[in-house]
Image (cartoon, coloured by chain):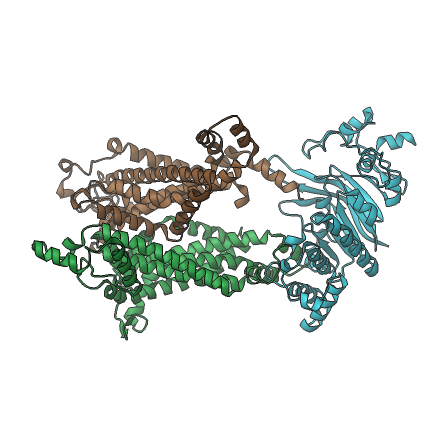
Chain colours: A green, B brown, C cyan
Amino acid sequence: MFAFLLRRIVQAALVMLVVASIAFLMFRFLGDPISNLLPEDATVEERADLREKIGLNDPFVVQYGRFITNAAQGDFGQSYRNNRPVSDLLAERFPATAELVLVAASLALALGIPLGIYTALNPRGWISQGLQVVSLLGISVPTFVTGILLILLFSVTLGWLPSFGRGEVVDLGGWTTGFLTLSGLKALILPSIMLALFQMTLIMRLVRAEMLEVLRADYIKFARARGMPNRMLHFKYALKNTLIPVMTIFGLQLGGLIAFAIITETVFQWPGMGFLFIQAVNFSDVPVMAAYLVLVSFLFVVINTIVDLLYHVVDPRLRVEKSTARGV
Amino acid sequence: MSTFMPMLYSAWDSDIAYSFRKSRVAVISTLLLLAMFLAAIFAPHLAPQNPFDIAELSLFDSELPPAWAEGGNPAYLLGTDTQARDVLSSIMYGMRISLVVGFASVILAAVLGVTLGLLGGFLGGIVDAVLMRIADVLLSFPPILVALLINGVLRGALPQSAQADSALIVLILSIGLTNWVQYARTVRGSTMVERRKEYIEAARTLGTGSVAIMVRHILPNVLGPVLVIATINLGMAVLTEATLSFLGVGMPPTQPSLGTLIQIGNEFLFSGIWWVVVFPAVALAVLVLAVNLLGDWLRDALNPKLR
Amino acid sequence: MTLLELDNIVVEFPTRRGPLEAVKGLSLELNEGQILGLVGESGAGKSITGAAITGLIEPPGLIRSGQVRLRGQRIDNLAPEKMRRIRGKEIGAIFQDPLTSLNPVYTVGEQLIDTMRVHLGLDHKAARKRAIDWLAEVGIPAPEARLDQYPHQFSGGMRQRVVIALALCAEPKLIIADEPTTALDVSVQAQILALLKRLCRENGTAVILVTHDMGVIAETADRVAVMYAGRLVEIGDVAQVIQDPLHPYTKGLMNSIPQIGNRDARLTQIEGAMPGLRNPAPGCAFAPRCPQAIDTCRTLRPIPVDAGSGQVACHLFGEAQ
């Protein structure tokens, strides 16, 4: 177990190094940092000074080393557009995205798993057929269209819920939360539904497919031949086998949620990291792009590593891999 | 039973045409797609108006609701936008751009993926290892994020003035370069299996070169799965294009795709002209849905075990 | 005493080109404690016959006509919940592949305990104790420690022993064993068969042993039923059928077993292949491959008649009388 943990951490560190290198290459070769940081009428001397000051004259390797060292400490330099440290910008925006993703993920899991099980167990019922159609709609209708339709219905027509922003937030020592005010909670509803809907349909389809597969497995047939009641077959013998792979995919999906938050945040002008990132892409604000890439990759890597570890805890076949002979 | 069910399956499997006729979903989606493809291809001849020709626009007719609503004008079936452009015509022209980006990026991804997969699977060793590591890294990120990044990098590398003109190419590249991995993995897998088979050995002994073996013997064997991936990918590509355009980093308003139209419409959401955003959105959803349904059917038809 | 009766069973699979009959009217009887070998080539319908008895034919397949009776009671038309109570408790089953028959994410103990609690109404503690006894019974060393291990920690042969324990733990009166040793090493096969035979003898459990291996039948079974293309061609006591097979197909099968101690004996193969289930010819299904076929064989289907220690369905046999 320990060796596995170590291997996994080394792997994660390697991925981060690759990502940081890509970020560095973007930073170094995309656009000219000097003309981006100085006003247009800056003199030649001012430009040369700044080049020297931010170290663009140093050898390539030194620059690379410095970038990696700074990045590891969360320092990504100045945003070209806002002229503020990128790390400040991201830190400000992080809680908004984190809360949105958290609510959406919980919603997606809480609905997706039971619905997936239901459709797998009653594949021919009309509710299942209906859910299959809805889920196909869910993965075919672009999320931003869903968001717009939600706004059109609940904000424009009915006027029940806000269509942009986070509402009132409470600052808890650097972490702004919308969970504590009524307007904050109301503002969360539409964006989190929009973000969750797609993931929910994905989880539902995945659970359904896995469960149908498992129900065809020999060990389920043998359990049925032993006269085990359906309740036990479905919710004990089949469910655990179903959820193990689903858990892995969900880990990846969590990353997907962070990425899709970019779209949700744009539709609802949600002041999160994704909104910041899309503005950065729009204006080629390279330091912000690079920092977002590194931060999001870091989150992915952490989540994936945790999921992998959990997988080893839950699946007995992997848990005792080392302690017994591999052969049969 | 052990031998009986596979027999049933292979009897069922042998007849794709039959399963197509039997599947109402497949027939309907194909008809829908055909109609949309034709409408897009022949947009300049079929559309009631050329929304890009200022001479055809009359500001008196701006913000008209759909023909059946109160104040609607039968000349503009789905209404007009703030600049008096006919929504139906805009959709037809927009679909054209969406489909061009979709098809081009799928072709780019397929060609790239198949080539790399063949190379990796056939050559093995370091080439294969490097390719697969790149694939792993790409796959661990959501495609939309990868596409956004490639998009950002490409646009950053271009001078500001050239950005609008090259938007189409930038989109095709960002989507195509994002989606090749699945092809490469599938093709690599089959290539490694095929490579070991006797007929490849035979071809080699006869002095057939590596490239010839790959193209003539291995490629035909992997085309089935590639077709399935390509169909499913087309839906994804159209969706990604629409998303990028919606986010403002895709097609500019001067050459709107369906995504751009929705983005433009979104800005007028609160002014009550819902038709400007709803109809392009419906068109996009129907297009993607039809492609996905067809892809699902094709996958099941080619591999009944996946059902 | 008669335990199980199959009365003219027809099993059908609907396909888009019309129904396929996998079993075409099969009748046989099995006494309590008896071991019956059911042999035939792949596709002869022997596994489906087994599934018909346990009520586990995969939909859309179904028993089109005929009856399955257990101790005189019809069981082929029971409600699903009633049939479930019979499965495991009255009729157990053992499948071909011990590697996939056990649930990978639960310990073997948990699977044994669940099964016994469902059928025997034991509490957890008592069930656990009996589970240990069963593991010991099927010859698993250190049963107490092994109880809490997962299937992947057992070897193939050991897993099949666990499968046997699972099938027998609710003390059924009949076991359907479908190729129980095919997936195992040859060295382990004999041990598993001997174990199965011993346990069934001790508990008075009857067995239907589905196999294509005449050698396995010879070693294990009391009676043997030979199936060909969905029908029974011969049934009788093992000794008689092996020594003196009546049906030409059975003779062909016997000639294909290697005989120990007779090096000069040649293995012969039956020429040709079993006909497909679709579009059956009017006569005897074996006629096209039969070396002794006469004209009647190609036009008229033979009906099983009493002969030897059982029955045989062959015109030639009638002629000879």
The answer to whether residue A265 is visible is no
- Asked where in the image residue A49 lies, by quadrant, the reply is bottom left
Q: Residue furthest bottom?
A: A173
- Asked where in the image residue A43 lies, by quadrant, the reply is bottom left
Q: Using the image as rendered, state which of residue C77 and residue C234 is in the foreground.
A: C234
A63 lies left or right of B116: left
Q: Residue furthest top?
A: C295
Q: Using the image as rendered, state which of residue C215 and residue B287 is in the foreground.
A: C215
A268 lies left or right of C262: left
The picture places residue B119, in percent across and down from the top left corner, at: 43, 38
Q: State the residue at coordinates (75%, 61%).
A: C139
- Asked where in the image residue A56 lies, by quadrant, the reply is bottom left
Q: Using the image as rendered, state which of residue B249 and residue B67 is in the foreground.
A: B249
The picture places residue A32, in percent across and down from the top left corner, at: 18, 51
Q: State the residue at coordinates (81%, 48%).
A: C36
The picture places residue C19, in percent across and down from the top left corner, at: 65, 38
Q: Residue furthest right?
A: C321
Residue A222 higher or lower than C253, as above or below:
below
How many labels, in total?
A: 0
The picture places residue A4, in percent across and down from the top left corner, at: 49, 62
Q: Using the image as rendered, state which of residue C169 and residue C218 is in the foreground.
A: C218
Q: State the residue at coordinates (90%, 40%).
A: C308
The answer to whether residue A316 is visible is yes
- In the rendered image, which quarter contains the N terminus of chain B? top right
Residue B206 higher or lower than A233, as above or below:
above
